[in-house]
Amino acid sequence: MDQPPVRATSAVLLGGTLLSVAFLVLGFGLSLGAGEAQSAEPRALAEVLRSALALEPWGLSMMGVLVLLGTPAAGLLSTAIETRRRQPVTAALALLVLAILLAAALAALAG
Amino acid sequence: MRAPHNRHVPLELLSFVAAIGAGAFGALAGIGGGLIIVPLLTVALGVPIQLAIAASLLGVIAVSTSAGATFLHRGLVDRRLGVVLLVATVVGGIIGGYTAGLLDGRTLSAIFGLVLVAVAVQMLRSRSRPAVEEVVELPGRLELDASYVEPTTGEEVAYRVRRIPLGAAISVLAGALSGLLGVGGGVVNVPTMSMLMGVPIRVALTTSTYMLAATAAASAVLYYSRGQVDALLAAPVVVGVVLGAQLGARLAQRVPQHILRLVFVGVALFFAVQMLLRAVNS
């Protein structure tokens, strides 16, 4: 049976995990050194970016969380691209799952 | 909402160590590490259960993406089946995430514990039956033919995925349990694929692992939107889980299928008792 390639999706999933873990390791390590709790409340992306660029443990950790949350979505997009020719139904379903995820995220963050 | 401040360092270090073990088991059994991490954080360390569930869901995503990438690269994931069932589990995850907190926790714990007992008993009873039915006819409209190379023998194993609509319906439940309890959903997905749909246990485990990320992400976004993601708690959990998952992914290549099945049954029974005790004691 002629199977569609998997290399890109595998790389996206692994790359997203590694990038996320890199942020989380930095945040984890710096938080141990800081020894003091950081604010956990702000959720705006601009605040996360500011905190991460300032090398604050919370911002770096939250960047890791956001990358991690985005990795499955990126994997679905990659799956759709890889399977679009040999398994078009799989590609369409991957895009459907991606659309459901994005709609739920937007609705949650807006509400 | 935050984890207890005065215990941050021991909490993070203990979470890190526990997450390594949970990640290894999650990748090996295809159920994620949530069933271990959530009780540890809430019962032993006093973390609010919402934060523990959110950290657990992030750990589940990390296990799924890292181990899933490995399984996918080695040709052990049935991606067609995984994407079909993802439609159902993601919808279930959103339903579970939204309804979390609205339903009585004791009732949910009791139901989940009983479901786990039923699954474990059914898995034990199915040991004498062949996992894969012989493929002799063309697949029906709602059936899928697939194959994989069993790593312990090097043989190509052909199988036919059956009862997809019923499997998808049950997968909604798996997603809802994930969103409600912070677990991966593999405790439902693996036996559903293995026993109901005719998928070999190894492919069921690896495909379940591959599916867990999107399912958990659907729920985790809801916790994030409610301000229940403590990034400083999530960091050691996720890092530990990823390290453990790499170990588990390697072990899964070497452990025979009947061992995987027994491990799964043992873990399901252990957590069934845990859930029932939570229902009685809370």
Image (spheres, helix red, strand yellow):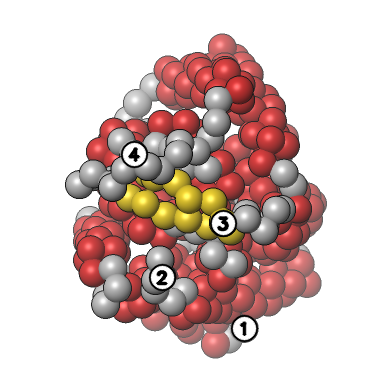
Residue B220 x/y as whole percent: 42, 54
Which mark is nearer the camera, 1 or 4?
A: 4
**Residue at mark 3:** B156
Report the amino acid beneath label 2. Answer: Gln
Q: Chain of mark 3?
A: B
Q: Disc 2, disc 1: CB below 8 Å?
A: no
The chain ID associated with circle 1 is A
Relative to the observer, which residue lies in front, B168 or A75? B168
A106 relative to A38 in the view: left or right: left
**Which residue carries the number 4 mark?**
B162
| Mark 3: secondary structure | strand
Residue A3 is tagged as 2
- x 56%, y 41%: residue: B201
The answer to whether residue A59 is visible is no
- How far is mark 4 from mark 2, CA to CA? 20 Å
Q: Nearer the viewer, mark 2 or mark 3?
A: 3
Residue at numbered disc 1: A55
Looking at this view, is B105 or B125 the one in front?
B125
Residue at (53% x, 43% y) in the render: B200
